[in-house]
Amino acid sequence: DTEVTQTPKHLVMGMTNKKSLKCEQHMGHRAMYWYKQKAKKPPELMFVYSYEKLSINESVPSRFSPECPNSSLLNLHLHALQPEDSALYLCASSQAGRGLAGVPDTQYFGPGTRLTVL
Amino acid sequence: GIQVEQSPPDLILQEGANSTLRCNFSDSVNNLQWFHQNPWGQLINLFYIPSGTKQNGRLSATTVATERYSLLYISSSQTTDSGVYFCAVGQGAQKLVFGQGTRLTINP
């Protein structure tokens, strides 16, 4: 099974709301990722968790707060977002959380959450 | 940081045609992946190919790491092949940098 699930599929929120995006995988992967994708643009990396620890933060504003409760789950907590944060938020996972030599670090993506901030 | 350039940006073909998509990158990499994003936004991994050649059905890919480019070949195109094809490269363990993509349209 190479499935990554994300909930919700769509989310509309006001600038004062607090909401969370959820991501789950059951492939035993030890690296999980959050990407942001604006319309007609490529995905941009936001955060990487490796073995449940935050390993990469691409200078993302603090209104985005990631959390990795366990090896299968990844959350993205949203607070005081701006309209320009409206985008498709993609979660991904891969096997080699530590970039082990010779292990293909193929990333598997979820279907995404389409976020609109009013 | 590493730069990734994909060409062509747009490609319109008739069903049954063959196509070649190119990805150039500016520095040595140890991770290179090709993805297909369908019209609904789902990204599907096609190949993990930091070097060498792989084939999967009508799709194949070749990466010449020493010359810093990769090619994705699609043969006998079908309308379901439409979407955006992304090349993504990495130098470290996990960080991938995506190219701008090639938007492929296959007309019946």
Image (tube, grey):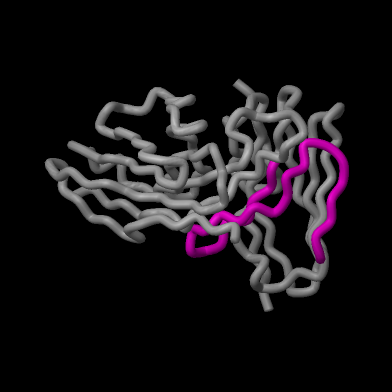
Magenta span: helix, strand or loop, mainly? Answer: strand
Q: Is residue B80 above or below residue A20?
A: below
Indicate yes or no whether the magenta region holds residue B52.
yes
**Residue at image location 63% in from the left, 65% down from the top:** B82
Q: Is residue A18 left or right of residue B41?
A: left
Q: Residue B87: x, y in percent?
A: 67, 43
The N terminus of chain A lies in quadrant: bottom right
- The residue range painted magenta reads B33-57
Q: Is residue A65 left or right of residue B18?
A: left
Q: Residue A62: x, y in percent?
A: 27, 27
**Residue at image location 25% in from the left, 32% down from the top:** A63
| Quarter of the view holding residue B76 | bottom right
Front residue (pair B54, A37): B54
Q: Is residue B105 left or right of residue B72?
A: left
Front residue (pair A100, A113): A100
**Residue at image location 33% in from the left, 41% down from the top:** A76
Front residue (pair A13, A108): A108
Q: Residue A48: x, y in percent?
A: 48, 32
Q: Residue B18: x, y in percent?
A: 82, 64
Q: Is residue B54 above or below residue A61?
A: below
Q: Is residue A39 above or below residue A61?
A: below
Tally of numbered tags: 0
The residue positioned farthest toward the left in the image shown: A16
The residue positioned farthest toward the bottom in the image shown: B108
| Quarter of the view holding residue B98 | top right
